[in-house]
Amino acid sequence: MSRVQVDRERCVGSGVCESIVPEVFEIDDDGVLQVLRQEPPADDLDGVRDAVQSCPARALVLAE
Amino acid sequence: MSVNTPVDPAQFDIEAIDLSDRDFWAEPPAVRHAVFDKLRAERPFAFFDEPTMEGMEPGPGYWAVTRLADLDAISAQPAVFCSGQGAVSIQDIPADLSEFYGSMISMDDPRHARIRRIVAKTFTPRMLEQVVDSVVGIVDDVLAEARAKAEAGDGSLDVVADIAAPIPLRIICDMMGVPEQDRELVLNASNTILSGGDPELTDEADPLTALIEAGMNMAALMERLAAERIENPTDDLTTALVNSEVDGEKLTHQEIASFFILLLVAGNETTRTAIAQGLLALSENPEQRARWMADPSMDKAAVEEVVRYVSPVTWMRRTATQDGELNGHSFKEGDKFLLFYAAANRDPESFENPHALDLGRSPNNHVGFGGHGPHFCLGAHLARRELAVTFRRLFEVCPDLEITGEPARLRSSFVNGLKRLPARLTGQR
């Protein structure tokens, strides 16, 4: 199972990931990233990979 | 000779190049880019003495970083290359002054992250979906006013004053809740704060007085708005600032004031520069303009290319917190690095034919919003939206816009701004 990991030291809540896969990522009202599905379904994996690549803070890792 | 005629980097003597020379920043863009090409190819970490500033001891100097890979590596290691000693000034200005004008730009984590989170959600792509309609409305209003003004006269207008400045000013002031009658003050103060010592905008003999006065005016405006928001909270960003707590404490008045100044200044100048310089670049590249105009599906890529090509913010500073080595370059604790986004965005290692405006460019991993790291531009998604809407509406509503003369360029090392750009509406639609 692939697992999403967030480096909390790096994340700045830019919300790029949320805009790509809202099913998996959400910025909460305090500006903190919440991972809604730690182990995203196969359908979302391409989006998650895109989000990992696109993160401006390089805060995301998908452990496959 | 057109200002864009390529200049051969070989004509420059590398020992004579001085990025701290104010006159260098008055050179045409082609000259500046040729000098960057020379440095990037031959001396990617080039050392310069600091520009002199009245009443200040000269500091130790700085390394100019011009390769994209080096710039991005520095941005991505904020613990080694910090911002807290000043990110927007080459000189070490007193910490309180630096924080006042730079706010979280000149802070390090964890405090930077805590402050940033107060407003982070407002600037996420998802939240910005909700302001698209108001962005379109503002852009249409501004373009209608520009046309009315031009048509009331001889058809001429100033792209900067009539189009590029009012659009981001109204959008950010709406988001912050700055009333109509105070917006002129915001515009003037941000011009002064980011004038970079341009003699038209600041007194060369005494640049600090004007800077401090502009900061005081903005702080006074914030005090007034903050007092109103405490009484009557709204859903604007100023309300978020006065109500937020960081580490269990409310922000101090000074912290709120500097955050307020940062959001207003950064929200204004950068997008204004991208619009004005972008329109200039399109008029110099008519085939690219025609291509974009005909194809709305290009908006996203074209906006990225405009930001790369223009690089509205020329540099930010980092300071080494320890001795070390980066891509073969040894450095000492306390060394200053100037990250030249404008140079990295023309790095041939990262961009094919880097000096060409190619609106369909892909991939386009530019650093116009900063390198990878915690200080990546907070307003990037807002700017992208503003630019996409502005250019598309311009194509639709003002296809007859024609640049008629040379721009007046801001003489600043920090912002690649234009002060004026003469144009006219021909009426041929």
Image: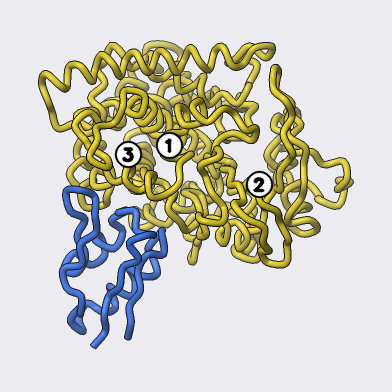
Chain colours: A blue, B yellow
The disc labelled 1 sits on which kind of residue? Thr
Q: Is residue B139 visible?
A: yes
Instruction: Say whether disc 2 or disc 3 marks the residue closer to the N-terminus.
Output: 2
* Kind of element beneath mark 2: loop
The residue at 57%/46% (across/down) is B285
From this view, report whether residue B144 is shown above or below residue B78.
above
The amino acid on which the numbered mark 3 sits, given as a three-letter code, is Arg
Chain at numbered mark 1: B
- Percent across and percent down for residue B338 are 64, 45
Mark in the foreground, 2 or 1: 2
The residue lying furthest to the bottom in this view is: A1
Picture disc at residue B271: 1
Please tell me how crowded label 3 is: few (under 14), some (14-19), or many (20+) other residues with Cα within 10 Å: some
Mark 2 or 3: the one toward you? 2
Q: Residue at x 32, y 15 (%)?
A: B221
Q: What distance separates the C-alpha of mark 1 from that of mark 3?
A: 16 Å
> Could you say whether the residue bearing mark 1 is in a helix, strand or loop?
helix
Determine the secondary structure under disc 3: helix
Q: Chain of mark 2?
A: B
Q: Residue furthest left?
A: B232
Give the residue at mark 3: B393
- Total labels drawn: 3
Q: Which residue is mark 2?
A: B334
Figure quadrant of the C terminus of chain B: top left
Does B109 sit above or below residue B92?
below
Residue positioned 31% across, 45% down in the render:
B114
Tell me if I can see residue B167 in this picture.
no
In the figure, residue A22 lies in which quadrant?
Answer: bottom left
**Quadrant into which the N terminus of chain B falls:** top right
Q: Position of residue B396 (x, y in %)?
A: 32, 39
Left or right position of B134 against B171: left
